[in-house]
Image (cartoon, rainbow, N blue to C red):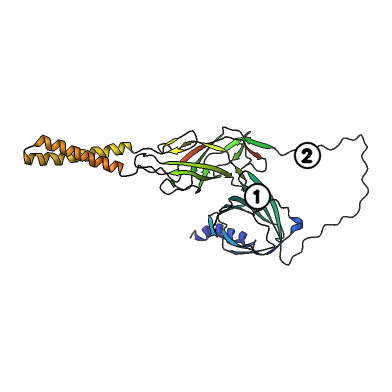
Amino acid sequence: MSSRPALLLPCLALAMRAADFAGEWNFDPERSRLDWLPAAPAALLKIETSGARVRCTACGQGGWDFATDGSKSVLAKAGVHTSIVTKWEGSALMINAIVSGPANYVIGDRWKLSRDGNALTILRQVQRGASESESTLVYRRAGTEAPAPRETAPGPEPARAPETAARPAAKAEPREFVLPPGTRIPMRLTGPVSTKTAHEGDRVYLETTFPIQADGVFVVPPGSQVIATVRFAERPGKVKGKGELMFWYDSIVLPNGVTKSLRVRLAGVEPGRGAVEDEGKIRGNSGKGSDAAKVGQTTSAGAGVGSAVGAATGRYGTGVAAGAAAGAAAGLARVFGGRGPDLELRKGETMEVVLEEPLRFIADEAGSGARP
């Protein structure tokens, strides 16, 4: 029996879940709670689905489309670059968007439908540098009415508690988990970086490779995304033969969409890729060994040519010396006429950062909440 239908089932399930969001949605300001947002909520959303892709058009704000199967979608428009990654958390759609342009920020959305499918609630977190805001946007499906408040029959007047009765206990504060300064976070590059092509301001993306725990609870699971920016990139010169790279590590995005700003320093890179200096700069390896080989090769070749010429003219020793000198000069010209090796960090190569400031999570934010 062919397994092809079975392979299609996950894709069909994704498409069916995405199709639930299709339709026109009116913003409900009375049931929404707004903090800082890059743009005011659209009064009308039009959502169209095709397979595992979603097209969302916001009235007066343009539109965008993305995949719901976990693959990355990229949108570039009017000098703004947006990278979108989604995942399903039960019936809720988690959308993480990294926006680069005149303003840089990260948006984490959680889309959830009501049981009757007529209300769309979007929990939206926006991370700008060290600041973070959280809003709740509620939309009603066009043509439906918000449910009226449920009326309850008047009951007997509750008995008044005596003045000496104990007051109810205050609501407990949510539990907090803190990763202290000095915590090491190992990670790997999700794409290559090279001094040959990197420029200041370029985005660099990494992912954590090891679960990090606080107080016995995993708070940063493997696969959490780390977003960095190229702060400094210099190719090796003709005399100074070492490439240099330096990154700012901006934020970390957990698989559940929670985003936190980072204050870290680079502690190490893939063995053999170079050295990490005190300020976090990566300095590549020099080409001195290959430079010496170039000089030696051309010196030897020059000596061979000189010996042949000297033998023909009866001045063997003089020919060898002259040929060697000419070969050495040619070798030096090759060395000083070209650059040293570029610093190349390949996809999948590892590096490690160390926290310089505490990284705090409350219980609902912690990556998995699972104990090791």
Q: Residue at x 48, y 39 (%)?
A: 351
Q: Is residue 372 visible?
A: no
Q: Which numbered disc covers residue 125?
A: 1
Mark 2 surroundings: few (<14), some (14-19) or many (≥20) residues within 10 A: few
Q: Position of residue 195 (x, y in %)?
A: 42, 45
Q: Which numbered disc covers residue 22?
A: none
| Distance from the alpha carbon under mark 2 to that under mark 1 | 25 Å
Q: Is residue 110 left or right of residue 280?
A: right
Q: Quadrant of residue 115?
A: bottom right
Q: Residue at x 14, y 37 (%)?
A: 320
Q: Quadrant of residue 211?
A: top right
Q: Looking at the picture, does residue 130 appear above or below residue 94?
A: above
Q: Is residue 31 left or right of residue 98?
A: right
Q: Amino acid at mark 1?
A: Gln
Residue corresponding to mark 2: 171
The foreground one among 149 and 234 is 234
Q: Is residue 168 visible?
A: yes
Location of the C terminus by quadrant is top right
The foreground one among 240 and 69 is 240
Q: Position of residue 26 (x, y in %)?
A: 71, 63
Which of the two discs, 2 and 1, labels the residue nearer the N terminus?
1
The foreground one among 311 and 75 is 311
Q: Residue at x 62, y 59 (%)?
A: 17
Q: Amino acid at mark 2?
A: Lys
The foreground one among 20 and 301 is 301
Q: Which mark's residue is nearer the viewer, 2 or 1? A: 1
Mark 1 surroundings: few (<14), some (14-19) or many (≥20) residues within 10 A: many
* In contact (CB < 8 Å): disc 2 and disc 1: no
Q: Residue at x 52, y 46 (%)?
A: 229
Q: Secondary structure at mark 1?
A: strand
Q: Quadrant of residue 164?
A: top right
